[in-house]
Image (cartoon, grey):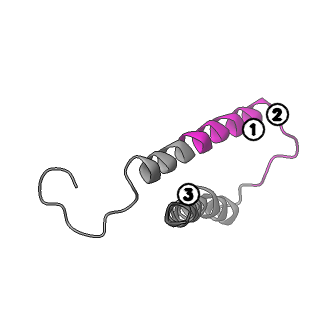
Amino acid sequence: MKIFAVVVRAVTYAALFVGLLFIYLPGRLLTWSGVVRPEAKDAPQIAGMIVGGVGTVIALWCIFTFVFVGKGPRRRLIRRGGS
């Protein structure tokens, strides 16, 4: 049960961070500057979706590696060596 909580917490924090920093804020800045969304989905938009999907897979892989290999965030300071 503990590992499930660590996975949920890590995925939630990562989704909130990525969603805010790389999706919401740029969207707001573009809207405020007068840039509008394209009417149709052409090759550049599809390429961007593919790159975004690959980035999502890599981010999830990093999160799961952090949780399962790194055993999640440490609760105490490690001065030298492991564990």
Q: Percent x, y for residue 48?
A: 68, 37
Extreme bottom residue here?
75
Location of residue 49 with respect to 14 vertically, above or below? above
What residue span does the magenta drawing correspond to? 36-58
Give the structural element (helix, strand or loop) at label 2. loop
| Image side of residue 6 versus residue 34, left or right | left
Q: Are marks 3 and 1 in contact (CB under 8 Å)?
A: no
Q: Amino acid at mark 2?
A: Asp
Farthest front residue?
1
| Residue at the spot of label 2 | 42
Q: Secondary structure at mark 1?
A: helix
Residue under pointer 1: 45
| In this picture, residue 12 sits left or right of residue 66 | right
Alpha carbons under labels 3 and 1: distance apart: 19 Å
Q: Residue at x 63, y 57 (%)?
A: 23
Proximity of marks 2 and 1: CB atoms separated by less than 8 Å: yes
Tell me the SS state at disc 3. Answer: helix
Q: Is residue 54 on the magenta stretch?
A: yes
Residue 6 at x, y percent in the picture:
49, 63
- Cα–Cα gap, marks 3 and 2: 25 Å
> Picture quarter containing residue 22?
bottom right
Q: Earlier in the sequence, mark 3 or mark 2?
A: 3
Q: Residue at 56% across / 47% down in the picture? A: 60
